[in-house]
Image (cartoon, grey):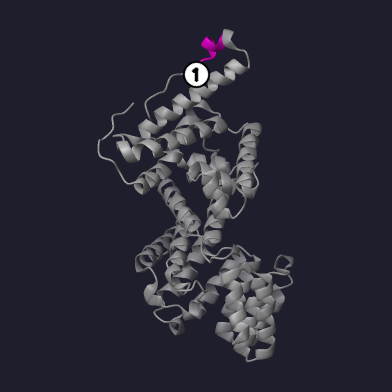
Protein backbone atom coordinates (compact mmCIF):
# COMPACT_ATOMS: atom_id res chain seq x y z
CA UNK A 1 0.00 0.00 0.00
CA UNK A 2 1.35 3.43 -0.90
CA UNK A 3 2.49 5.52 2.08
CA UNK A 4 0.30 8.39 3.17
CA UNK A 5 1.13 11.98 3.95
CA UNK A 6 0.40 12.69 7.57
CA UNK A 7 -1.69 15.86 7.44
CA UNK A 8 -5.49 15.47 7.53
CA UNK A 9 -7.34 17.02 4.56
CA UNK A 10 -10.69 18.63 4.00
CA UNK A 11 -13.48 16.12 3.34
CA UNK A 12 -14.87 18.14 0.43
CA UNK A 13 -11.44 18.15 -1.24
CA UNK A 14 -11.23 14.38 -0.80
CA UNK A 15 -14.66 13.89 -2.37
CA UNK A 16 -13.69 16.05 -5.36
CA UNK A 17 -10.44 14.08 -5.82
CA UNK A 18 -12.26 10.75 -5.60
CA UNK A 19 -14.81 11.87 -8.18
CA UNK A 20 -12.00 12.75 -10.56
CA UNK A 21 -10.12 9.48 -10.01
CA UNK A 22 -13.12 7.11 -10.07
CA UNK A 23 -13.35 6.67 -13.89
CA UNK A 24 -9.58 6.25 -14.21
CA UNK A 25 -9.49 3.49 -11.60
CA UNK A 26 -12.58 1.78 -13.01
CA UNK A 27 -11.10 1.89 -16.51
CA UNK A 28 -7.90 0.25 -15.26
CA UNK A 29 -9.80 -2.58 -13.57
CA UNK A 30 -12.18 -3.24 -16.45
CA UNK A 31 -9.31 -3.35 -18.93
CA UNK A 32 -7.46 -5.76 -16.63
CA UNK A 33 -10.29 -8.08 -15.54
CA UNK A 34 -13.06 -7.47 -18.07
CA UNK A 35 -16.15 -7.84 -15.84
CA UNK A 36 -17.67 -4.35 -15.72
CA UNK A 37 -20.21 -5.05 -12.98
CA UNK A 38 -17.80 -6.66 -10.52
CA UNK A 39 -15.13 -4.08 -11.25
CA UNK A 40 -17.55 -1.22 -10.65
CA UNK A 41 -18.62 -2.71 -7.30
CA UNK A 42 -14.96 -3.13 -6.29
CA UNK A 43 -14.16 0.47 -7.17
CA UNK A 44 -17.13 1.71 -5.16
CA UNK A 45 -15.81 -0.18 -2.12
CA UNK A 46 -12.37 1.36 -2.61
CA UNK A 47 -13.90 4.84 -2.91
CA UNK A 48 -15.85 4.30 0.30
CA UNK A 49 -12.71 3.18 2.13
CA UNK A 50 -10.84 6.26 0.90
CA UNK A 51 -13.68 8.59 1.87
CA UNK A 52 -13.53 7.23 5.41
CA UNK A 53 -9.73 7.10 5.80
CA UNK A 54 -8.20 9.97 3.84
CA UNK A 55 -9.80 12.94 5.64
CA UNK A 56 -8.33 11.77 8.94
CA UNK A 57 -5.14 9.99 7.85
CA UNK A 58 -4.12 12.08 4.84
CA UNK A 59 -4.13 11.47 1.08
CA UNK A 60 -1.65 8.87 -0.22
CA UNK A 61 1.34 10.01 -2.24
CA UNK A 62 -0.23 8.21 -5.20
CA UNK A 63 -4.01 8.34 -4.59
CA UNK A 64 -4.81 6.65 -7.90
CA UNK A 65 -2.39 3.83 -7.13
CA UNK A 66 -3.90 3.39 -3.66
CA UNK A 67 -7.44 3.19 -5.06
CA UNK A 68 -6.41 0.81 -7.84
CA UNK A 69 -4.64 -1.51 -5.39
CA UNK A 70 -7.55 -1.57 -2.95
CA UNK A 71 -10.12 -2.05 -5.73
CA UNK A 72 -8.06 -4.86 -7.28
CA UNK A 73 -7.91 -6.63 -3.93
CA UNK A 74 -11.68 -6.25 -3.52
CA UNK A 75 -12.17 -7.68 -7.03
CA UNK A 76 -9.96 -10.68 -6.25
CA UNK A 77 -11.85 -11.27 -2.99
CA UNK A 78 -15.15 -11.22 -4.86
CA UNK A 79 -13.77 -13.50 -7.56
CA UNK A 80 -12.64 -16.01 -4.94
CA UNK A 81 -16.01 -15.88 -3.21
CA UNK A 82 -17.79 -16.49 -6.51
CA UNK A 83 -15.39 -19.33 -7.30
CA UNK A 84 -16.10 -20.94 -3.96
CA UNK A 85 -19.83 -20.60 -4.42
CA UNK A 86 -19.62 -22.37 -7.72
CA UNK A 87 -17.62 -25.14 -6.09
CA UNK A 88 -14.59 -24.68 -8.22
CA UNK A 89 -12.02 -25.03 -5.49
CA UNK A 90 -10.24 -27.76 -7.42
CA UNK A 91 -9.46 -25.45 -10.32
CA UNK A 92 -9.19 -22.19 -8.43
CA UNK A 93 -5.42 -22.24 -8.46
CA UNK A 94 -5.24 -22.61 -12.24
CA UNK A 95 -7.94 -20.02 -12.83
CA UNK A 96 -6.59 -17.46 -10.40
CA UNK A 97 -6.44 -13.97 -11.87
CA UNK A 98 -3.13 -12.20 -12.24
CA UNK A 99 -1.92 -10.23 -9.23
CA UNK A 100 -2.31 -6.45 -9.29
CA UNK A 101 -0.04 -4.82 -11.84
CA UNK A 102 1.60 -1.39 -11.73
CA UNK A 103 -0.93 1.37 -12.35
CA UNK A 104 -0.72 2.33 -16.07
CA UNK A 105 -0.36 5.96 -17.10
CA UNK A 106 -3.10 5.68 -19.76
CA UNK A 107 -6.43 7.49 -19.13
CA UNK A 108 -9.38 5.22 -19.96
CA UNK A 109 -12.07 7.88 -19.48
CA UNK A 110 -13.08 7.94 -23.16
CA UNK A 111 -13.31 4.14 -23.37
CA UNK A 112 -15.39 4.10 -20.18
CA UNK A 113 -17.74 6.79 -21.50
CA UNK A 114 -18.24 4.84 -24.71
CA UNK A 115 -18.98 1.69 -22.73
CA UNK A 116 -21.52 3.47 -20.52
CA UNK A 117 -23.24 4.85 -23.64
CA UNK A 118 -23.35 1.45 -25.35
CA UNK A 119 -26.15 1.30 -27.96
CA UNK A 120 -27.69 -1.72 -26.19
CA UNK A 121 -28.71 0.55 -23.29
CA UNK A 122 -31.70 2.86 -23.03
CA UNK A 123 -30.99 6.59 -22.73
CA UNK A 124 -32.10 6.58 -19.07
CA UNK A 125 -29.70 3.73 -18.32
CA UNK A 126 -26.88 5.48 -20.18
CA UNK A 127 -27.38 8.61 -18.06
CA UNK A 128 -27.48 6.70 -14.77
CA UNK A 129 -24.49 4.52 -15.60
CA UNK A 130 -22.44 7.50 -16.83
CA UNK A 131 -23.10 9.44 -13.64
CA UNK A 132 -22.20 6.42 -11.54
CA UNK A 133 -19.18 4.98 -13.37
CA UNK A 134 -17.64 8.11 -14.89
CA UNK A 135 -19.07 10.83 -12.68
CA UNK A 136 -18.37 8.98 -9.46
CA UNK A 137 -21.79 9.82 -7.97
CA UNK A 138 -23.39 7.41 -5.55
CA UNK A 139 -26.76 5.83 -6.27
CA UNK A 140 -28.37 8.15 -3.72
CA UNK A 141 -26.77 11.24 -5.31
CA UNK A 142 -27.98 10.21 -8.77
CA UNK A 143 -31.48 9.60 -7.43
CA UNK A 144 -31.58 13.08 -5.89
CA UNK A 145 -30.21 14.64 -9.06
CA UNK A 146 -32.70 12.92 -11.36
CA UNK A 147 -35.60 13.20 -8.88
CA UNK A 148 -36.37 9.49 -9.03
CA UNK A 149 -36.40 6.88 -6.25
CA UNK A 150 -33.03 5.42 -5.29
CA UNK A 151 -34.35 1.93 -6.01
CA UNK A 152 -35.16 2.99 -9.58
CA UNK A 153 -31.61 4.24 -10.14
CA UNK A 154 -30.15 1.05 -8.64
CA UNK A 155 -32.33 -1.02 -10.94
CA UNK A 156 -31.30 0.99 -14.01
CA UNK A 157 -27.62 0.58 -13.18
CA UNK A 158 -27.99 -3.12 -12.47
CA UNK A 159 -29.83 -3.74 -15.74
CA UNK A 160 -27.28 -1.67 -17.63
CA UNK A 161 -24.44 -3.82 -16.33
CA UNK A 162 -26.36 -6.97 -17.27
CA UNK A 163 -27.00 -5.71 -20.80
CA UNK A 164 -23.38 -4.76 -21.28
CA UNK A 165 -22.34 -8.22 -20.13
CA UNK A 166 -24.94 -9.91 -22.35
CA UNK A 167 -23.89 -7.84 -25.37
CA UNK A 168 -20.36 -9.21 -25.08
CA UNK A 169 -18.91 -5.70 -25.21
CA UNK A 170 -15.15 -5.49 -24.75
CA UNK A 171 -13.43 -2.71 -22.86
CA UNK A 172 -11.74 -1.11 -25.81
CA UNK A 173 -12.28 1.70 -28.27
CA UNK A 174 -14.67 0.74 -31.08
CA UNK A 175 -13.29 0.59 -34.62
CA UNK A 176 -12.81 3.89 -36.43
CA UNK A 177 -15.94 3.26 -38.50
CA UNK A 178 -18.10 3.20 -35.32
CA UNK A 179 -16.27 5.80 -33.23
CA UNK A 180 -18.11 8.83 -34.60
CA UNK A 181 -21.55 7.36 -33.90
CA UNK A 182 -20.55 6.25 -30.40
CA UNK A 183 -19.03 9.64 -29.53
CA UNK A 184 -22.25 11.27 -30.76
CA UNK A 185 -24.18 9.14 -28.26
CA UNK A 186 -21.82 10.25 -25.47
CA UNK A 187 -22.37 13.90 -26.42
CA UNK A 188 -26.14 13.41 -26.38
CA UNK A 189 -26.00 11.92 -22.88
CA UNK A 190 -23.76 14.71 -21.57
CA UNK A 191 -26.01 17.33 -23.19
CA UNK A 192 -29.09 15.72 -21.66
CA UNK A 193 -27.48 15.74 -18.21
CA UNK A 194 -26.49 19.41 -18.60
CA UNK A 195 -29.91 20.47 -19.91
CA UNK A 196 -31.73 18.87 -16.99
CA UNK A 197 -29.32 20.58 -14.61
CA UNK A 198 -29.56 23.96 -16.32
CA UNK A 199 -33.36 24.05 -16.54
CA UNK A 200 -35.00 21.32 -14.48
CA UNK A 201 -37.98 19.75 -16.18
CA UNK A 202 -39.86 19.50 -12.87
CA UNK A 203 -39.58 20.33 -9.21
CA UNK A 204 -39.25 23.42 -7.02
CA UNK A 205 -35.87 24.70 -8.31
CA UNK A 206 -34.92 26.02 -11.72
CA UNK A 207 -31.36 24.64 -11.53
CA UNK A 208 -29.78 21.39 -10.42
CA UNK A 209 -26.21 22.56 -10.18
CA UNK A 210 -24.90 19.10 -9.29
CA UNK A 211 -26.03 17.88 -12.72
CA UNK A 212 -24.92 20.82 -14.86
CA UNK A 213 -21.58 20.99 -13.04
CA UNK A 214 -21.00 17.28 -13.51
CA UNK A 215 -21.82 17.50 -17.21
CA UNK A 216 -19.30 20.31 -17.66
CA UNK A 217 -16.62 18.36 -15.77
CA UNK A 218 -17.14 15.21 -17.85
CA UNK A 219 -17.18 17.18 -21.10
CA UNK A 220 -13.88 18.78 -20.12
CA UNK A 221 -12.46 15.28 -19.65
CA UNK A 222 -13.77 14.27 -23.07
CA UNK A 223 -12.26 17.41 -24.59
CA UNK A 224 -8.85 16.46 -23.19
CA UNK A 225 -9.17 13.02 -24.80
CA UNK A 226 -10.50 14.33 -28.16
CA UNK A 227 -8.88 17.77 -28.54
CA UNK A 228 -9.49 17.98 -32.30
CA UNK A 229 -13.18 17.01 -32.25
CA UNK A 230 -15.15 20.14 -33.14
CA UNK A 231 -18.45 18.95 -31.67
CA UNK A 232 -16.85 18.08 -28.32
CA UNK A 233 -15.43 21.59 -28.19
CA UNK A 234 -18.76 22.99 -29.34
CA UNK A 235 -20.67 21.19 -26.60
CA UNK A 236 -18.25 22.40 -23.93
CA UNK A 237 -18.55 25.95 -25.25
CA UNK A 238 -22.36 25.71 -25.26
CA UNK A 239 -22.37 24.50 -21.66
CA UNK A 240 -20.01 27.26 -20.49
CA UNK A 241 -21.88 30.03 -22.32
CA UNK A 242 -25.23 28.83 -20.99
CA UNK A 243 -24.06 28.20 -17.44
CA UNK A 244 -22.43 31.65 -17.36
CA UNK A 245 -25.91 33.19 -17.10
CA UNK A 246 -26.98 31.01 -14.17
CA UNK A 247 -26.28 33.61 -11.42
CA UNK A 248 -28.75 36.01 -13.05
CA UNK A 249 -31.45 33.52 -14.09
CA UNK A 250 -33.22 33.57 -10.73
CA UNK A 251 -34.07 36.32 -8.28
CA UNK A 252 -33.45 36.31 -4.51
CA UNK A 253 -36.70 34.36 -4.01
CA UNK A 254 -35.80 31.76 -6.65
CA UNK A 255 -38.16 33.22 -9.24
CA UNK A 256 -37.20 32.82 -12.91
CA UNK A 257 -35.72 35.92 -14.57
CA UNK A 258 -35.98 35.80 -18.41
CA UNK A 259 -32.95 36.56 -20.55
CA UNK A 260 -34.18 40.00 -21.55
CA UNK A 261 -34.51 41.09 -17.90
CA UNK A 262 -31.30 39.61 -16.49
CA UNK A 263 -28.58 41.71 -14.87
CA UNK A 264 -25.74 40.99 -17.28
CA UNK A 265 -23.23 42.24 -14.76
CA UNK A 266 -23.90 39.05 -12.80
CA UNK A 267 -22.97 36.78 -15.71
CA UNK A 268 -19.72 34.83 -15.36
CA UNK A 269 -17.32 36.78 -17.58
CA UNK A 270 -14.57 34.16 -17.29
CA UNK A 271 -16.85 31.34 -18.48
CA UNK A 272 -18.09 33.54 -21.36
CA UNK A 273 -14.53 34.32 -22.46
CA UNK A 274 -13.59 30.63 -22.41
CA UNK A 275 -16.74 29.62 -24.28
CA UNK A 276 -16.34 32.31 -26.95
CA UNK A 277 -12.69 31.35 -27.49
CA UNK A 278 -13.64 27.68 -27.85
CA UNK A 279 -16.42 28.22 -30.36
CA UNK A 280 -14.38 30.75 -32.36
CA UNK A 281 -11.50 28.30 -32.63
CA UNK A 282 -13.61 25.29 -33.55
CA UNK A 283 -15.79 27.08 -36.13
CA UNK A 284 -12.64 28.20 -37.91
CA UNK A 285 -10.96 24.81 -38.03
CA UNK A 286 -13.46 21.94 -37.75
CA UNK A 287 -16.48 20.72 -39.74
CA UNK A 288 -19.55 22.60 -38.51
CA UNK A 289 -21.92 20.64 -36.28
CA UNK A 290 -25.10 21.39 -34.31
CA UNK A 291 -23.39 21.88 -30.95
CA UNK A 292 -21.03 24.43 -32.48
CA UNK A 293 -23.96 26.32 -34.00
CA UNK A 294 -25.86 26.33 -30.69
CA UNK A 295 -22.71 27.57 -28.97
CA UNK A 296 -22.36 30.34 -31.56
CA UNK A 297 -25.95 31.43 -30.87
CA UNK A 298 -25.26 31.46 -27.12
CA UNK A 299 -22.09 33.49 -27.76
CA UNK A 300 -24.04 36.16 -29.67
CA UNK A 301 -26.42 36.52 -26.71
CA UNK A 302 -23.61 36.57 -24.14
CA UNK A 303 -21.48 39.12 -25.99
CA UNK A 304 -24.28 41.69 -26.23
CA UNK A 305 -23.71 44.26 -23.44
CA UNK A 306 -27.45 45.11 -23.42
CA UNK A 307 -30.47 43.14 -24.58
CA UNK A 308 -31.18 45.78 -27.25
CA UNK A 309 -27.67 45.23 -28.64
CA UNK A 310 -28.40 41.58 -29.48
CA UNK A 311 -27.59 40.79 -33.12
CA UNK A 312 -30.83 39.02 -34.02
CA UNK A 313 -29.99 38.93 -37.73
CA UNK A 314 -26.92 36.82 -36.95
CA UNK A 315 -28.91 34.62 -34.57
CA UNK A 316 -31.60 34.02 -37.21
CA UNK A 317 -28.96 33.10 -39.77
CA UNK A 318 -27.44 30.59 -37.34
CA UNK A 319 -30.89 29.08 -36.61
CA UNK A 320 -31.58 28.76 -40.35
CA UNK A 321 -28.33 26.82 -40.71
CA UNK A 322 -29.07 24.74 -37.61
CA UNK A 323 -32.56 23.88 -38.92
CA UNK A 324 -31.00 22.47 -42.08
CA UNK A 325 -28.21 20.64 -40.30
CA UNK A 326 -30.11 19.24 -37.29
CA UNK A 327 -33.86 19.96 -37.54
CA UNK A 328 -35.95 19.49 -34.43
CA UNK A 329 -38.97 20.89 -32.58
CA UNK A 330 -36.98 23.06 -30.13
CA UNK A 331 -34.92 24.48 -32.99
CA UNK A 332 -38.16 25.48 -34.72
CA UNK A 333 -39.52 27.16 -31.58
CA UNK A 334 -36.36 29.19 -31.13
CA UNK A 335 -36.24 30.02 -34.83
CA UNK A 336 -39.79 31.39 -34.60
CA UNK A 337 -38.65 33.80 -31.89
CA UNK A 338 -35.66 34.88 -33.99
CA UNK A 339 -37.93 35.43 -37.00
CA UNK A 340 -40.20 37.61 -34.84
CA UNK A 341 -37.27 39.68 -33.59
CA UNK A 342 -36.03 40.30 -37.15
CA UNK A 343 -39.23 40.42 -39.26
CA UNK A 344 -41.89 41.18 -36.66
CA UNK A 345 -44.23 39.13 -34.42
CA UNK A 346 -46.70 38.35 -37.21
CA UNK A 347 -43.95 36.58 -39.19
CA UNK A 348 -42.89 34.77 -36.03
CA UNK A 349 -46.44 33.55 -35.41
CA UNK A 350 -46.67 32.23 -38.96
CA UNK A 351 -43.42 30.32 -38.43
CA UNK A 352 -44.79 29.01 -35.14
CA UNK A 353 -47.99 27.80 -36.81
CA UNK A 354 -45.89 25.74 -39.20
CA UNK A 355 -43.75 24.37 -36.37
CA UNK A 356 -46.64 23.20 -34.20
CA UNK A 357 -47.59 20.57 -36.77
CA UNK A 358 -44.77 18.50 -35.28
CA UNK A 359 -46.40 15.88 -32.97
CA UNK A 360 -43.46 16.23 -30.57
CA UNK A 361 -44.74 19.68 -29.61
CA UNK A 362 -48.30 18.55 -28.89
CA UNK A 363 -49.14 19.61 -25.36
CA UNK A 364 -45.65 21.01 -24.71
CA UNK A 365 -45.65 24.06 -22.46
CA UNK A 366 -42.83 25.75 -24.39
CA UNK A 367 -45.00 25.93 -27.51
CA UNK A 368 -47.65 27.94 -25.63
CA UNK A 369 -45.00 30.03 -23.86
CA UNK A 370 -43.48 31.09 -27.18
CA UNK A 371 -46.96 31.73 -28.63
CA UNK A 372 -47.82 33.91 -25.63
CA UNK A 373 -44.59 35.89 -25.99
CA UNK A 374 -45.16 36.53 -29.70
CA UNK A 375 -48.84 37.47 -29.15
CA UNK A 376 -47.72 39.89 -26.47
CA UNK A 377 -45.24 41.47 -28.89
CA UNK A 378 -48.05 41.71 -31.45
CA UNK A 379 -50.26 43.57 -28.94
CA UNK A 380 -52.93 40.85 -28.63
CA UNK A 381 -53.05 40.93 -24.83
CA UNK A 382 -56.13 38.72 -24.34
CA UNK A 383 -54.77 35.90 -26.51
CA UNK A 384 -51.34 36.27 -24.89
CA UNK A 385 -52.88 35.99 -21.41
CA UNK A 386 -54.72 32.80 -22.35
CA UNK A 387 -51.55 31.26 -23.84
CA UNK A 388 -49.49 32.16 -20.77
CA UNK A 389 -52.09 30.50 -18.52
CA UNK A 390 -52.16 27.37 -20.68
CA UNK A 391 -48.36 27.16 -20.64
CA UNK A 392 -48.37 27.56 -16.85
CA UNK A 393 -50.79 24.66 -16.46
CA UNK A 394 -48.66 22.39 -18.65
CA UNK A 395 -45.24 22.87 -17.07
CA UNK A 396 -44.03 20.73 -14.15
CA UNK A 397 -41.37 23.27 -13.13
CA UNK A 398 -42.59 25.47 -10.26
CA UNK A 399 -40.31 28.46 -11.11
CA UNK A 400 -41.48 28.38 -14.73
CA UNK A 401 -45.11 28.07 -13.65
CA UNK A 402 -44.85 31.05 -11.31
CA UNK A 403 -43.17 33.12 -14.02
CA UNK A 404 -45.79 32.24 -16.64
CA UNK A 405 -48.61 32.98 -14.20
CA UNK A 406 -47.05 36.35 -13.41
CA UNK A 407 -46.85 37.17 -17.13
CA UNK A 408 -50.53 36.30 -17.48
CA UNK A 409 -51.37 38.54 -14.52
CA UNK A 410 -49.30 41.42 -15.91
Horizontal and vertical percent for residue 238?
47, 63
Count every numbered label the image shows and give the total: 1
**Quadrant where the C terminus lies?**
bottom right
Q: Is residue 94 within the magenta segment?
A: yes
Task: Please say whether residue 142 is visible from this viewpoint.
Answer: yes
Q: Is residue 166 above or below residue 184?
A: above
Q: Secondary structure at mark 1?
A: loop
| Residue occupying the point 52% across, 10% down | 93
Outermost residue toward the top? 90
Instruction: Give the residue drawn at x 66%, y 67%.
Output: 329
359, 67: nearer the viewer: 67
Q: Which residues are magenta?
A: 91-97
Front residue of 184/263: it is 263
* The quadrant where residue 317 appears: bottom right
The relative height of residue 380 versus residue 41 in the rendered view (above or below) is below
Secondary structure, magenta segment, majority class: helix
Left of 385 or right of it: where is 178? left
* Residue found 71% across the figure and 65% down from its top: 360
- Check the picture and name the quadrant holding the N terminus: top left
Q: Residue furthest left?
A: 6
Residue 142: x and y in percent read: 54, 49
* Residue 135 x, y percent position in the rendering: 48, 46
Q: Which residue is mark 1?
A: 97
- The residue at 42%/34% (across/down) is 49
User: Is 295 rendered above or below residue 9?
Assistant: below
Q: In screen coordinates, is 276 left or right of 153?
A: left
Q: Quadrant of residue 252?
A: bottom left
Is any atom of residue 181 visible in this view? no
Residue 278 forms part of the magenta stretch: no
Residue 186 coordinates in the image, percent (x, y): 54, 49
Kindly give the residue lying farthest to the bottom in the view shown: 379
Q: Nearer the viewer, residue 365 or 116?
A: 365
Amino acid sequence: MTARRGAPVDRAAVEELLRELAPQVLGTLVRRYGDFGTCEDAVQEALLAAALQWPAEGVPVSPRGWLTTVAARRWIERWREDTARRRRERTAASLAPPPPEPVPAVDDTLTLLLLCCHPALTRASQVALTLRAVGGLTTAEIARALLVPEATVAQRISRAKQRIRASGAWFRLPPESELGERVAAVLQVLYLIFTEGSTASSGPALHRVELSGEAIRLTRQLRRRLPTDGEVAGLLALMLLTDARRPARTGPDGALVPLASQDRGRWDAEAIAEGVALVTETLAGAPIGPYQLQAAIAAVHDEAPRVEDTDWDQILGLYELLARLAPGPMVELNRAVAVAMVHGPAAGLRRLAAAEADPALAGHHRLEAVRAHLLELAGDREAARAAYRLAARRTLSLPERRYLESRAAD
